[in-house]
Amino acid sequence: MKKFLSLALALCLAVSMAACGGSASSSAATSDTASAAVSGSAASAGAIKIGVSGPLTGSAAQYGEGVANGVQLAVEEINAMGGIQFEYRAEDDVADPESAVNAYNTLMDWGMQLFAGTVTSDACIAAAELANEDNVFMMTPSATAVEAIAYPNAFRMCFSDPNQGAASAQYIGDHQLATKVAVIYDSSSTYSSGIYENFAAAAADNGFEIVAAEAFTSDSNQDFSVQLQAAQSAGAELVFLPIYYSEASLILSQANTMGYAPQFFGCDGLDGILNAENFDTSLAEGVLLLTPYVPGVDEVTTEFTEKYTEKFGIAPNQFAANAYDVVYAMKAACEAAGVTADMSASDICDAILGVIGDVEISGVTGASISWDAESGEPNKEPRAVVIRDGAYTAPNDAADAQEAPAEDASSVAAESVSEAA
Amino acid sequence: MGLKNLGRTSRKNLVTYLIAVLAFVILEGMVLTGNISNMLEGQLVPICAYVIAAVSLNLTVGILGELSLGHAGFMSVGAFAGALFSVSMEDTITVTWLRFVLALIIGAVAAGAMGVLIGIPVLRLQGDYLAIVTLAFGEIIKNVLNAVYLGVDENGLHFSMKDSIALGLSENGKVLIKGAQGIVGTPRDSTFIWGFALVMLTLFIVLNLIKSRTGRAVMSIRDNRIAAESVGINITKYKMIAFSLSAALAGVAGVLYAHSFSSLVASKFDYNLSIQILVFVVLGGIGSIRGSMIAAAVLTVLPEMLRSFSEYRMLVYAIVLIVMMIFNQSPKMVEWRKRVFAGRLKGAGHNAAKKGGA
C-alpha cells in the first residue's frame, strides 16, 4: 500500500517538475497576469523588461515595497512620456541569498533584460554572481556592501558602506560636532556593521575619539538601556546610529526617558524615522542624518514626494527614491546606448557598459549623478539633513558643508526651505 | 533471482534508490536538453542539500526517537567549515573536485565533532527537555558564527569576536569571515551531479545503518530504553553514534548548500530552518527515509511554484502544507486511504477470481 502511495507521490513530483520546466514560457505568461497587481504596467510589444528583486514580505518588507513602488512610479512616468517603454516585475526574495537566486532565475524565465536589484546586500551578492554569469546589466538601488557590485556589470545607486561611514566621520570632523563619540550598531546586520567599521577607521583622521562602541543584534533589539548607559557614562557628546529607523526610534525614546540628550547622528537608514509607528516625532528633534534623499530639498524631490504619497498613500523612503532614480538611470543609459526591446540581455549589457561612464542624470537623490565605469559606484553628494519641527530640513550651515559648485543651486533651495520651516 | 528473493526491507530500500535515480535521470535529462526553467535549475542543488538534511534529521527523530530542533546549527557548522576551506584554498587547490571533496570531508568532520560535543550534555536528557536544549544549541551556534571575524595575512590567522578592525590585519590581509556578513565569494563548486551523488551516499549510509546491528540497537533504545538497557545495550554509545552521524550528514548538506551560493550568512541557519527541516521529516513520515526525501524536494520547490500568488505566496504555502499534512498523517485519512485502496485491490482480485472461475 505504502509503495503505491509513494510511487504516486514520486510521479506527482516528476510531473510537477516537468510541468514547471517544460512550460516555462506559459507559466511566465500566466504569472504575468497574476502579478499585474504588483507590476501594474500593461505589457506592450516594445517594452524593455526590468526585473526587481527585494524583500516584499518578512521583516525587511518595507524596503522592498519602497523599491517596488519607486520603480512602478518611474516606469509609469517614463511610459507616459513616450519614447523608450519599460515593463517591470517585482519578485520577493525575503532578503535571503537563496531566495534571491530563485527570484533572479524566475525573472530570467520571464525574460528580464535589465536587473534593478537586489534591495539587500547579502541577497545582492548571491544574485550578482548569476547576473555576471549571464551578463545582465544590474543596478542595485540599495545594496550597500562593497562586494555587492564586485563585477563589471554591476552598479549601484546608493552609497556604499565605506562611503557612508567615511562621509559621516568627515561631516562630524568638518563641523566639529563632537570630540567624544559613541556608536550603537547592529552587529548582526551587514549594513550596520559595515558602516560602523569604516566610521571607526576614519575617526582618528577627523579629530574625534570613539569612547563607546556598543553592539546589539536583531534578536535583542528592544531594550537599549545598557548601550545608552555605556554611552552616557563614557561622556559621549554625540551618538552615531548607523542603523535602521525602527531601532533608532526606540533608542531615542529610551534616551529621553533616562534624561540623556546628546547629539544623534545617523545615515540613510534613519530616513523614515518620522513615519515610524507609535513614535513621538518631537523626540527626533535635532537629529542629524546623512542621506541622499531629502524631501523638499529641491523641486524635483518635492514633486516626487507628492506624487508618491498621492499614489501609494505613504511617504517615500530613501529606498523608493533610489529605486526611482535607478529606472531613470536605466532610461538614460538605454537612450545613450541605443538599446531596443528586441535586444538580448547580454547585448544590452555590453551596449550599456560602453556608455555608462558618460551617463549623467539629475534625480531625486542627487542633482547630478554619474557613475564610475570601473567600480560601479555612483558620484553624488551626500546631503545632510536635520530634523526640525517634525520635518526633514537642511542644516543652516548647508552652504558651508556643500562646497561643490554643482550643489549651489540645491543648497540655496535647501536654505529657503529651512527658513520657511 | 529476482525481487522476490530480496527481503521486504531490501525491496523497500531499492524502491527508495530507484525514486532518487529516476528523479535524477529525468531532471538531468531536462538540463541537458535545455528543457528546464532557470528557476528549477537553480534549485536543484539546494533541493539535494535539503534532502540530505531531512534524511539525516530523520536519523535522530525517526530512528533514535529524539526530537532535535537544532539541526540547522549542524548544517551551518558544516557550511562555514567547508566554505572557509574553499575560500582560503581557492588559489592553492585549483582542481575543483578535489577542493570540493576536501571541503565535504572537513565540513562533515567539523559538524560531526560538534555533534559529539553537543551530544555529551544533550543526550543525558530525554523527550521535550532534549528538544529544547537542541533548540538552544542551534541558536548558540548561529549567534557565535554571527559574531566571528577571521582574517589572514602574512603573519597567519587573526581572530576576533568584536569587529574586523580588531583583527589588526596588514595591508595584504584578507578577511575570511566577516561577522554578520558571513563568508563572501565561496567558489560555486557544487553541481547537481555532486548533489545527487551525495544524496545517494546519504541514503546508502542511513539505510544500511538502519538494517545493521547498530541500527537495531538504536531502534531498541527508541522503542524501550529500559528493555534495551537490560539486555546489555550501551545506551550512551548508540545514542551518540546516531546523533553525531546525523550531525555529520547535516554538515555535508551544509557544505553542498554553501557551495551553491556565493554569499553565506549565519542568520540563514536560524530555528526557522531547523523547523523547516523537521517539517520535511514529519510530513514525509517520521522514520520513513523515502518520505523525508520526497517531502524535502516537494516543499523546497513549492514556494517557488507559488510565486504567481505574489504576497499571498507563503499563506498559500502554509495552507497547502496543512492539507498535505492532514492527507498524509491524519488517522482518519489514513484509514480512508487504506479502505479505498484496499477496496479497489480486493475488488480487482475478486473480479480476477470470478473470471478464473468462469
Image (tube, rainbow, N blue to C red):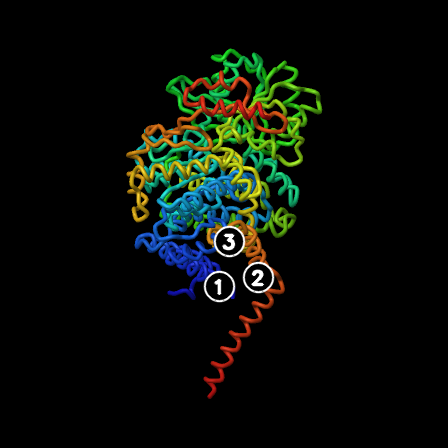
> A306 or A184, which lies in front?
A306
From the viewer's perspective, is residue A211 above or below residue B270?
Answer: above
Q: Which residue is mark 3?
A: B309
Q: Are labels 1 and 3 assigned to the same chain?
A: no
What's under tag 2, amino acid-wise? Phe
Q: In front of the other: label 2 or label 1?
A: 2
Q: Chain of mark 3?
A: B
What's under tag 3, amino acid-wise? Phe
Q: Residue at x 37, y 42 (%)?
A: A114
Q: Which residue is mark 1?
A: A3
Residue A351 appearing in the image: yes
Q: Residue at x 59, y 41 (%)?
A: B236
Label 3 environment density (alpha carbons within 10 Å; few <14, some 14–19, many ≥20) = some
Quadrant of the image containing the N terminus of chain B: bottom left
> A394 or B304, which lies in front?
A394
Which mark identifies residue B327? 2
What is the total number of numbered labels drawn onto the structure image? 3
Q: Position of residue A305 (x, y in %)?
A: 52, 36
Q: In front of the other: label 3 or label 2?
A: 3
> B319 or A384, which lies in front?
A384
Q: In front of the other: label 1 or label 3?
A: 3
From the viewer's perspective, is residue B38 above or below residue A322?
Answer: below
Q: Position of residue A401 (x, y in %)?
A: 49, 18
Decide if residue B71 is on the left or right side of residue B105: right
Label 1 environment density (alpha carbons within 10 Å; few <14, some 14–19, many ≥20) = few
